[in-house]
Image: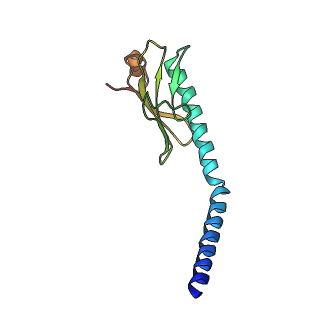
Amino acid sequence: MNHRIGRVLFALTVGLAVAVFSFKWITNPEPRGERAREEQVVQISRSLLSSIVESDSLEIVDPLAPNRKVGKVYVFAEAPGWAVSGYYRRSDEDRWHPYLMRLTENFDLQRLKVQDEALAERAAADSTLEISQ
């Protein structure tokens, strides 16, 4: 009889602890705030990339529009600033060009590393743009 009461009390205690933990985890606003900041960073990186590549039909794969067939992408908070990786192409005939963009904490472009020879001329005049092989 004592074992049965002990098991019931143990089950009630564990169930209550799981319920309290779950409630606190679900109602925590911090992860939603972090997600909103990450989405803002990716939107800014899209506009910066579009202004640099200058294409009417630019297609971008990034953390807000992932495509596992193209490759892995991420947005990551770094001290100080952000890093965003992704891929882009100008048209269906163009190959996917990987990029890594580093932004300051004020969302200014710090560095953009791409594998795109079409931007070589622009990279010669822009110190924030790096062409890799």
Picture colour scheme: rainbow
Total marks drawn?
0
Residue 133: image location, x then y, percent: 31, 24
Image quadrant in which you'd find residue 120: top left
What residue is at 47 percent from the left and 14 percent from the top? 92
Residue 7 placed where, x, y %?
A: 57, 79
- Compared to residue 81, the image places residue 132 above or below, namely above
Q: Quadrant of residue 132?
A: top left
Percent position (x, y) of residue 13?
62, 75
Q: Residue furthest front?
A: 1
Question: In this view of the protein, which residue sits in the foreground, 24 or 110?
Answer: 24
**Front residue of 15 and 102:** 15
Q: Is residue 32 shown left or right of residue 115?
A: right
Q: In the image, residue 37 lies at what x, y percent?
A: 60, 43
Residue 127 appears anywhere in the view: no
Note whether residue 124 is visible: yes
Foreground of the two, 104 or 97 = 97
Q: Residue at x 44, y 28 (%)?
A: 69
| Residue 14 vertical placement versus 107 (above, below) | below
